[in-house]
Each structure stands twice: as C-alpha cells, then as structure tokens.
Amino acid sequence: MQSFSYLRPADADAAIAAAAQPGKKYIAGGTDLMQLMKDDVERPAQIVDLDALPYTKIEAGPDALRLGALATMSDVAAHPEVARKYPVIAQALLASASPQLRNMATMGGNMLQRTRCGYFRDTGFACNKREPGSGCPAIHGQNRLLAILGGSGHCIATHPSDLAVALVALDTVLELRGANGATRQVALGDFHKLPGDTPHIETVLQPGELITALVVPASAAARRSGYLKVRDRASFEFALVSAAVALDLDGGVIRDARIAMGGVGTKPWRLPAVEGALRGHQAGDVAFAAAAAQAPEGAMPAVQNAFKVKLMQKTLVRALRTVAA
Amino acid sequence: MNALIGQPINRVDGRLKVTGGAKYAAEFDMPGLVHATLVQSTIAAGTIIAIDSRDAEGMPGVLAVITPDNAEKLKLEKAGQEMVTRPLLQDAQIFYNGQPIAVVVADTLDRALAAAAAVKVTYRQGEAVTIMDSVLDQAYRPKHFRNGERSPDSNRGDADAAFDAAAAKVQATYTTPVEHHNPMEPHATVARWDGERLTVWTATQGIAGTQRTLATLFGVPVSSVRVICPFVGGGFGCKGNTWPPATLTAMAAQKVGRPVKLSLTRRQMYSSNGYRPRTVQKLRLAADAQGKLVAMRHDGLTQMSMPSLGEFAEPVGLATEMLYACPNVAVTHRLVAVNQGLPTYMRAPGEASGVFALESAMDELAVALKMDPVELRLRNDTDRDGHAEKPFSSRKLAECYREGAEAFGWSRRNPAPRSMRDGNALIGWGVATATYPANRRPASAAVRLNADGSVHVFSGTQDIGTGTYTVMSQVVADTLGVPLNRVRFLLGDSAYPPAPTSGGSTTVASVSPAVQAACAAVRQKLFGLVLADPETGGGFTAADLSLQNGAVYVPGRRLPLAQVLARAGVESVEAGASSGEAEGKAGYSLHSFGAQFAEVRVDPELGEIRVSRYVGAFDAGRILNAKTGRSQLIGGITYGIGMALLEATETDAETGRYVNANLAEYLVPVHPDVPTIQTIFVAGEDTQVDPLGARGIGELPMVGVAAAIANAVYHATGVRVRDLPIRLEQVLA
C-alpha cells in the first residue's frame, strides 16, 4: 500500500471538484478499494470519502424504485418494497458477498466493483486493464472464472457484480452528477464499456463524475423476477454463472421478458435476443430451451471456461422455470 | 484416578481465546520494535543481476534493505537435511516465482511496505518448468525418503503377474492439486538479539526445531536461542519447519540492532511456507471373484521444487502397503521437479492424497465386482500389517464400518448409480476407509507442586489449536489427584523441557507419558518428604500414602501440602521425567482407523455438488477429551470436504505464479458447505502406543473424506471423477 491523503468533503460539489483531479479516488464502503490498495493495484494519492453525502435513501414510488448511491446492500436487500416488487434485486443482493461486506458495500460502489481476475489483482502479472499494453496472460492462462462473452484479444475479465446483473435486466438508469452541478442520466446497459483495446476504461464516467442514484422502473416483469446464482461454494463466492430473469405473463403467454446473466460477460450481460425469442410464446420448457439456446450467441470460450456455454443455457432455463412457476 | 480423562471438558484456554487474551506471535510488542516486509521475485527461474534499493533506502523511516549483496552470511554448511536453508538471501539464484529476494525494515509497517514497492530488481531470466504434468517423464527417486529410513519403493509377492491373472481389476490414474494450508493466523515472527542471545516469538508447530535451526544458521549455541510460542492460530503443517520468513526476521533484527516483526500477508502465505504438492497416482487393483485382493500397485508421482531447495516426498503409497490383506503389493514414490517452492506436510501428508486414490480405486473395484463397497472392505480386513509383517496393536476397522453403516443407514442404499433421488436432486452415498499411523516420539516434562496446592507443569510442546493445554491439564489433574483449576500447564517455550514438533498427530501420545511420569516422580518426592519426617511418616511406606485434593493422606491423617512443605522447609517440590518411543513399537504395527460415510446432493442439470449428510466412525484409541476430540473430527472432515470439492491453488503455467493466492478465489468450505457431521468414536484403548492408550487424532479424520465424497458423486451421477477438486463441469450433464 502506498501512502495517501484523506478528504471528507461536506457536499457533492466539493467532492466532485476534488475528485476531478488526477490521482484521486472516491471511497464509499471501501470493500473493494481497500483490497485493491493493499495489493498496490490502486495507488491513489488521495481518497475522497463520500460518507458525509446524503445519497442513502431508498424510495419505492409507484413508477420506480430510486436507490441512493450510498444505500448499503444490506439496507436495500431488507427493504420490504424491494423484496415485493423487485425480488430479483433482493435475491441478487443476498447472494452477494457476506453479511459483513453487505453492511458496508454501497449501490454506487457495487456498479464500480472491479474484476476478480487473478491476473488483474496481482501486480506480479502483466495485465492490460491494470497496465495498458502490458498484455493479457489470462487468455491463455487460468481462465476458468473468466468471461466467454464481450471479451477481446486484450481482456476477458468477468464483471463480478450480481446486483448489476439484476439491475441491467430491469432497465435501470443511473443518475450522474459532474463538474459545475451538471447532471445526466445513463442507462446501466450503456454504463459499462466492453474492453476492446482499452480494457482499463471500464465505464462512461467522466473524471470526478459521481453516481448519485440508481432508478429502477416499476413493471409487471420486475414483480415476477428472480436471480439464480451457480457456484462451486455454497456461499461467499462470485458467480460461475448467474441469471436475472423477469417475466410478464399473460395467462401462460410471455408478454415481456427481461434477461441478463452474470459470470459470463465482461460487463453485466443483457440478452435481448433471448428476450425476443421468449415474447409471445407459451411459458414452458420448450420455449425456455429454444430461447436459452441463443444465450451463448457470440461466445468465445477459452480452454477452461468452455463449460459456461452449456451451463449458461441450463442456468437460464432453470431460472425461467422458477420465475414462471 | 480417571475422573477427568475422557470427559468433555471445556478448553482451559477458551476464555483467553474468545476475549483476545491469548497472545499470538504477531501480538508481542516491545520497546523499539520495528517492522519488516519481504520483497519477492516475479520470475520463476534465473538470477538476480541487480537490486537497486537506493530509492527505498531514502524513503522516510526506512532502516535497512537487506539483499543478497549485504545479507549476513549464514552457516549453511552446518545445517541438517531437515532444515530449510534456501532461499535466505545467500545467493542471487531464483528457483520460483514469489521467492524472497530482499527484506525491507522500517519504523512502521506502512513505511516498510511502501519502500518494498520501490525496490527495483533486474533479472537474467532462466528457463522455467512450472507444471509437473509436462515433465512426468523426468520423474526421479527421492534421495531422503522418510528421512532415509527406508526405500521409496516396496514390493511383496508379484503384483503385476497377479494383476494380469486376476478375475476383476481396476486400473486408473488419479490426481490431486497443489493445496495451501490457510491457517487463520498467518505466519509471524518477532526477533530480538541481546548480544549473542536471540529470542524469537514465532508461530511454530515446533519450538525445539526452530531453536535448533536458528542456532545452527546463525552459529550460536542452542542454549543462546529462546523460542516462545504460547498459541498457534492453526498450522496444518505449514508451521512445522523453520521457513525463511522466521530466519530472515532474525537476520533483520541483527542488521538493525532492534527487535523486528515480520508478519506474512495472506498472499505471502502461498509462497513462503510450503504447500501440499500436486500428485499423479497410478493405481492397479485386482481381486478374485470373492472380492479378496490379489494385487495392488500404487505408483505415486509428486511435485517437488528444484532439488537445491531441499526435498519433500509426499508418501502417498504408505497406506496401500498396510491397509488391507493382500499378498502381492508394489509401491513406488517418485518426484517431479518444477520451479515452485518447496512443498511440505499438510494435514495427513501422504494419506490424504494417497488414500483418495486408493479408496477411489477400491470403489471402482467394488463396482467391477458388483459388490457392496463396505463388504469389499470387510472382506479384505486383516489384523496383520503385511508390509511391516507385524500384527496391528489394535484394529477396529470392522467395528467402524458396522457402527458407521448403522448410523448412516447404509443398508437402504440402492447400489445403482443415479438411482436415488430427493425431488429433482440426485443423491449419492459413498464410503471410504481412513487410516493414519499412531506416532509417538520422545518427550519430557517437569512438574512443580506448590505449597498452596497448585501444580505447575512445564513442557516445551505446542498447542496448535488442538487442545494440548486442556488435555494435558486433565492428565495432570487425574494423575496427581488435584482439581483441574489448580493445574497450570505451561508450554510453547524452549526454556521448558523439550518435546517434539506438533506434527504427525504425535502430541498426545508423546507428551502425556512424560507428563504422567513427571507427576509420578513429584508424588514420589512428596511422599519421600512425608516418610522422612518421623512425626508424619513413622512406620509407613509409600504404598500407604495417597495424594488427593491438595493433601497427602497418611492412614488416619490428612496432611495439607502447605504443611508437608513447611515441615520439610521447602517452598515447592519439583521433578522432571522423559518418555521414549511407543511401548509396542517393536512388536506391533501402530495405526488408527476409521470409516467415512458421505451423502452428496447433485443438481442434475447445473452440476452443483453439495455434501448433505456425513457420518464418520473412528478407532483412535482412548479419547482424552470427548469435546476437543469431536472438534478434531469435525475439523478434519471439513478439511476433507474442502479437498474433495473446493481447494486448489492454480498456477499460471507461463510465469509459475499462483493466480488465486487469496481467500476469495482459493475456496475453503464455509458454513453452508458443511452439513451436520455425526461422529462416532469406537470404544477402545491402545496401550501399545502409550500408557493412557490414546492415539493422536489431528489427521486421521480427514483421510478418506475426499474418496468417500468422490464415490458418492459417482453413485449420484454415474460419473467417476478422478481429479480433485470435483467441480460441476466434470459432472455437468
């Protein structure tokens, strides 16, 4: 760990002004950043603590769920309206990390959680994400946990978040605040960038720009939703494959479907082709299997993670079956 | 006399542990203490051309940067074969990625870490071989197998000819991965020199070994080195040797002339104190139509470091030599050198990996014979060790199977794979045998009886979390007839009478005889005082006296200890004693046994495997404490669940660097991975091992767990997985 200074601004604009400078890093719950700093992967000159900022509210309105960026994973998971109208969110949260971590980790921070790729997290390895241009030994190395979708010849690191998978399925929009009080909205689906040849650039955030809220539109599909996470260890592990499924059923017919998967993509992976294949069909194993067959479209598996091609289809069918039941 | 032995007494140090009062190595603070950290290589083979430490040395608070250029020259030529003598900054050679190449000392840990990151190293990169499977053809015979006490090979009968002629046979290759011990407490050392005298507070399973190793390497008398270790936060073998971090801490303390602390990070725990080596094991088993074994061949290849780091040969085939009745048995052990660190003992070394292979192969043989796998074991049970050519001192394997099968409900098993379901889930039941040698080594202890009736017992043994403090206190209380709360057992200090390293499940069997003998000697001395005093002893002999509840009973009279000592004009009575090898070592083969029963649930579509039920029945002699004993069984079985389904250290082939050197991606079981575990101790005692009839149980319960689970996975899915850990992609439909 490198020495750093600490700043705790009283309001958002002061925080944004401070963090817009190079070498600055926001800290909220710190559950990921502290690990990265201890491993010398992140070496900020100053950390800007968001602790004094007011973005902790959870507001469940008739049209949308508005999650303050500093709301903790524990508080959101325990919110009765979240569990009732957006079960996929509560389930994804409860499948994440451990209770101690969920008590600290925040909504905004979770969107910015960095990959668990072991090559990225050890400065003894080359890594294009950590040191652009140094190379990606993971592509031909230990890649069982890495992405089969969205990768490039420069990076196949998996996006680690469960929550982001659930939120991207529900068309969540992020509210961002930048320099001089400017605000904008970005769909979560557009927030994370594919690695391409710049894997070190992970989101569309501008320097100093701050996530202030995550807005999830209410929908019939969101009410009938669920999250399934497949992993080696029964708890406290990142997903090998996960599925966030939301269905709007009219009788037995699928009126609308929102599907995203985790553990397979370099970003939270929305599956519009699968959604299209489900719409208008009778809910059931036939439609589910046919639609799930399209899930790995575009997959470029490496040696050790090739099983995810099959596993993602089976996971998706199981999740669809569970949510439709 | 045996009021306390066997009882489920709470740990006598339990309160200290849960209140933070138990002091571990890294928690010893002292005036002037400064902090050290390691700089490690980022290549797997080659030489250091230069270490540029100028920037680091100029950083605030930095006291020293120790490199091969300026390190103290150690007395390597005097070191014994068992001592770890490399890498200790004595030369510029690199043998593995993550090797310590420099030590940075600063006034605070943060400053040491920052300076360590500023040390610049240039290398001449050599050719590295990092994966043993690519060089299996270069396997070689170990040079010091079992410390040179026996050949790495054994042969009785003609296993190959018998195999070829047999009615039923199995031939398969099994692999186990590199695993790391991952004790909760990372290794830590605090070292302080006072002139020529060195004191180290260090996390070790063997204070005597550390004392001897440091004295040898620094060229000072053994009596000038004191090693203190009152508590160990788990060792599992990785604290059995004196690894480079401990030696380098003493070197750093010498360099800066102040006490130095070095505590490893979790990542460094993967590169600094050994690991369970990868194994590739070829098994051939054959039986006659009745299921009697006629041939066994076990060829074990295990991973080694470059030979110049030392030698460790995982003895995977030893259980195959003795476990069952079989006239034709051949075993070989070979090593395959790669550019990784030196491997070492890890809980049940040899047996954990070897019995996975053997007992998986036994299950395959049962399938080939269409025989119940419990029945196959019973048909090959024996009261004689065919390798040692001696009877077992006590072997209750059949009782273990009987009682375990009864508790598990084994008779309700449908033998056909994929035949048992619970809802959608596939259910599988598997069994395997556990075995581990009953080891004992010479030990010593001293007892001091105080006038207030309290007893202090001293022995240079260790409590590595297993309960030594507790069970030895029970032994003392029962032997001397004093209440448990008047006994204070002191250990973990090389100033005390020497005892062996706590490894190989030896502590109970080794230390308890010495403690008993010392107690008997002190009682004898005390009685001597009574008898020598005409007022109290007139006309009596020692046989007339007894010691109970802090008083000597002379016929018709109770003499409180204080009174006896006051009359004799002494403040205390002291005596010491030593004990030797197991009583029955010459005439008997000494082993513990067990039967492991596992139930797994497998998701038929997703492949997720979870252990849902577990019964383990063990013949481990007499159990000194039913509670700490049960904890050992649960801990060992949990360790085995990790081995079966979760644990593996992944190496990047190109660089030889570990990719998952952390507890997020190196998976150990968490609570939902561990079902309720039913444990059974089959009643018995084995006085051929020690007078109390107890055998160590630290390692026995994890032996065979991985095989029982693999066999259950086969029963559930019909898929035979021969490579650990068993992962969902291996059974994915």
Image: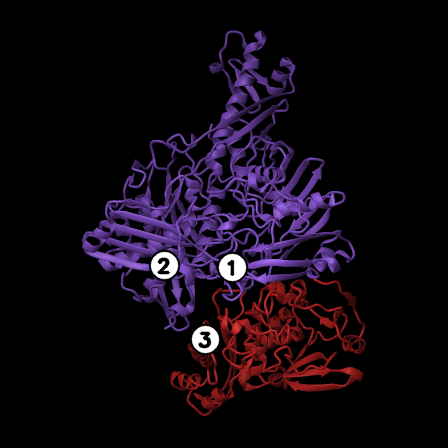
Chain colours: A red, B purple
| Quadrant of the rendering where the C terminus of chain B is positioned | bottom left
Marks 3 and 1: which is nearer the front?
Answer: 3
* Amino acid type, mark 3: Lys
Marks 2 and 1: which is nearer the front?
Answer: 2
Q: Residues within 10 Å of mark 3 (few under 14, many from 20)?
A: many
Q: Residues within 10 Å of mark 1 (few under 14, many from 20)?
A: some
Instruction: Identify the element where label 2 is drawn.
Output: strand
Callouts 3 and 2 in the same chain: no
Q: Residues within 10 Å of mark 2 (few under 14, many from 20)?
A: many
Chain letter for mark 1: B
Q: Quadrant of residue B410?
A: bottom left
Q: Quadrant of residue B118?
A: bottom right
Along the horizontal axis of the image, is B216 left or right of A228? right
The answer to whether residue A84 shows anywhere in this view is no
Marks 3 and 2: which is nearer the front?
Answer: 2
Along the horizontal axis of the image, is B65 left or right of B465? right
Q: Position of residue B329 (x, y in %)?
A: 28, 47
Q: Quadrant of residue A156?
A: bottom right
Q: Which mark is residue B174?
A: 2
* Amino acid type, mark 2: Tyr
Residue under numbered circle 3? A308
Residue under numbered circle 1? B670
Instruction: Identify the element where label 1 is drawn.
Output: loop
Along the horizontal axis of the image, is B94 left or right of B296? right
At 41% from the left and 44% from the top, the residue drawn is B145
Q: Position of residue B139 (x, y in %)?
A: 40, 55
Instruction: Identify the element where label 3 is drawn.
Output: helix
Residue nearest the viewer, comparing B660 with B42 = B42
Residue nearest the viewer, comparing A281 with B578 = B578
